Image (cartoon, rainbow, N blue to C red):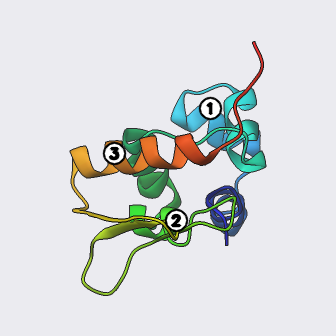
Amino acid sequence: MSLSSNIRTLRKRAGLTQIELAKELEISIATLRRWEAGETAPTGTRIKELAERLNVTPEDIVANGSDSNDKKTIPEHGMLVFDNGVSRIEIPPTEKGYELFNKLVESMLPKQRE
């Protein structure tokens, strides 16, 4: 599943609408909709907030989180792994690790026009 699909599926599993979750996270509904559409991705801090609210781990949200053919998974040894077929990066699941992982995910998303 993609990162955006994970967010949508876990939100629905928690029985929340987009409006309810956006209010609880104190973000705009447009931001949540962009996350669920795969247009943008939440920051590492937001992933942790999402996980807390949805009663899952941050790893559940980012596991296999890719909106392309690239692999971004959490293997059994607990590291965040970014593997795009050219390079493989293992990142510890720390605050800084989630920030870096988020930047890698964002770099793979299509750029928005301004």
Q: Residue at x 62, y 32 (%)?
A: 23
Q: Secondary structure at mark 1?
A: helix
CA–CA distance in space, label 3 to label 2: 15 Å
Q: Earlier in the sequence, mark 1 or mark 3?
A: 1
Q: Residue at x 74, y 44 (%)?
A: 18
Tell me the mark number nearer the camera, choosing from 1 and 3.
Answer: 3
CA–CA distance in space, label 1 to label 3: 26 Å
Q: What's the residue type where badge 2 is placed?
A: Asn
Q: Is residue 6 visible?
A: yes
Q: Secondary structure at mark 2?
A: loop
Q: What's the residue type where badge 1 is placed?
A: Lys
- Using the image, determine if residue 10 lies above or below residue 104: below
Tell me the mark number nearer the camera, choosing from 2 and 1.
Answer: 2
Q: Secondary structure at mark 3?
A: helix
Q: Badge 1 is on which residue?
A: 23
71 left or right of 2?
left
CA–CA distance in space, label 2 to label 1: 34 Å
- Marks 2 and 1: CB-CB under 8 Å? no
Tell me the mark number nearer the camera, choosing from 3 and 2.
Answer: 2
Crowding near the residue tagged with mark 1, few <14, some 14–19, many ≥20 C-alpha atoms within 10 Å = few
Q: Position of residue 74 (x, y in %)?
A: 39, 75
Q: Badge 3 is on which residue?
A: 100
Q: Badge 2 is on which residue?
A: 84
Residue sitting farthest toward the bottom: 76
113 left or right of 98?
right
Q: Position of residue 62 (x, y in %)?
A: 50, 63
Crowding near the residue tagged with mark 2, few <14, some 14–19, many ≥20 C-alpha atoms within 10 Å = some
Q: What's the residue type where badge 3 is placed?
A: Leu
Tell me the quarter of the picture where residue 45 sits.
top left
